[in-house]
Image (cartoon, rainbow, N blue to C red):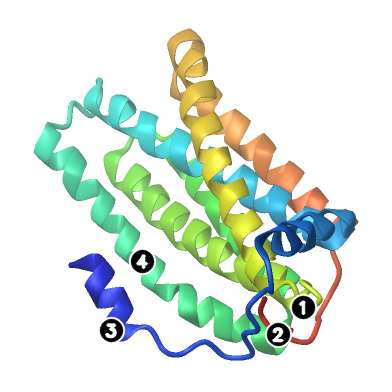
């Protein structure tokens, strides 16, 4: 059903030029790694993936333990907070006017605020933190994807593919790496590591990245 909905509902591609052969497409994709700006986008995507999967995996353990003791049903309802990710198109629209990096920065700061709030022992504060994390992370994901596409220099399709690869690779790493942290030091250690990763993401974005670029044709 999902595949059929996407097939029928997605708009036609704009500025798309298909590659003549697969090897050329892979060479173009690899060529984006020579750009500091593109690498900054990939690294931000990777780090956000680490945080997302690490957070999603272990927030349930945190909230099912004292002092919260939430049931499985209650834990499931908490993730309705991710509906706030519907604000991502608004973030994208704003970034088109004021620049991608400033908007990504604000989104990452919102995300970080959410992480800090989840360290609270008050359930409502933790829930607010989950909402802010969802809002910041999903918006940052969307705008960073656009940032990568803007600087792709005619290789937008391949660049977006590498960005998604970095995102999902980060998710796999996050789900694995956060386990020993949870076992060894609990939720506090996970939040501290996630905040550290956010600092790395922000430093990477501003040290390696660039400002506005014109949209490029897709290949």
CA distance for labels 4 and 3? 25 Å
CA distance for labels 2 and 1? 5 Å
SS class of the residue under badge 1?
A: loop
SS class of the residue under badge 4?
A: helix
**Relative side of 74 to 68, left or right:** left
SS class of the residue under badge 3?
A: helix
Of callouts 2 and 1, the N-terminal one: 1
- How many other residues sit within 10 Å of disc 1, few (<14), some (14-19) or many (≥20)? some
Asked if marks 2 and 1 touch (Cβ < 8 Å), the reply is: yes
The number of callouts visible is 4
- Towards the viewer: 199 or 160: 160
Of callouts 4 and 1, the N-terminal one: 4
Query: Label 3 belongs to which residue?
Result: 8
Report the quarter where the N terminus lies: bottom left
Res. 201 visible in picture = yes
Query: Label 4 belongs to which residue?
Result: 84
At which x and y percent is residue 20?
Answer: 69, 74
Report the quarter where the C terminus lies: bottom right
In this rendering, is residue 136 above or below 52?
A: below
CA distance for labels 2 and 4? 31 Å
Query: Label 2 belongs to which residue?
Result: 217
Residue drawn at 75 percent across, 52 percent down: 202
SS class of the residue under badge 2?
A: loop
In this rendering, is residue 4 above or below 120?
A: below
Of callouts 2 and 4, the N-terminal one: 4
At which x and y percent is residue 50?
Answer: 55, 38
Residue drawn at 63 percent across, 70 percent down: 157
Query: Label 1 belongs to which residue?
Result: 154
């Amino acid at each position: 059903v999902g595949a059929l909905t996407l097939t029928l509902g997605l708009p036609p591609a704009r500025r798309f030029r298909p590659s003549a052969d697969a090897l050329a497409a892979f060479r173009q994709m690899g060529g984006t790694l020579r750009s500091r700006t593109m690498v900054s986008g990939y690294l931000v995507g990777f780090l956000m993936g680490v945080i997302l999967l690490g957070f999603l995996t272990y927030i349930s353990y945190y909230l099912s333990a004292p002092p919260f003791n939430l049931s499985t049903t209650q834990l499931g309802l908490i993730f309705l907070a991710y509906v706030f990710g519907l604000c991502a198109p608004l973030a994208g629209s704003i970034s088109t006017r004021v620049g991608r990096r400033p908007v990504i920065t604000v989104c990452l700061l919102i995300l970080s605020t959410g992480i800090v709030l989840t360290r609270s022992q008050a359930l409502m504060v933790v829930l607010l933190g989950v909402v802010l994390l969802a809002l910041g992370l999903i918006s940052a994901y969307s705008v960073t994807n656009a940032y990568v596409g803007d600087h792709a220099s005619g290789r937008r399709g391949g660049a977006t593919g590498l960005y998604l690869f970095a995102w999902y690779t980060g998710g796999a790493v996050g789900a694995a790496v956060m386990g020993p942290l949870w076992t060894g030091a609990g939720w506090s250690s996970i939040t501290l590591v996630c905040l550290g990763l956010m600092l790395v993401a922000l430093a990477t974005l501003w040290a390696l990245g660039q400002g506005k670029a014109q949209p490029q044709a897709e290949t």
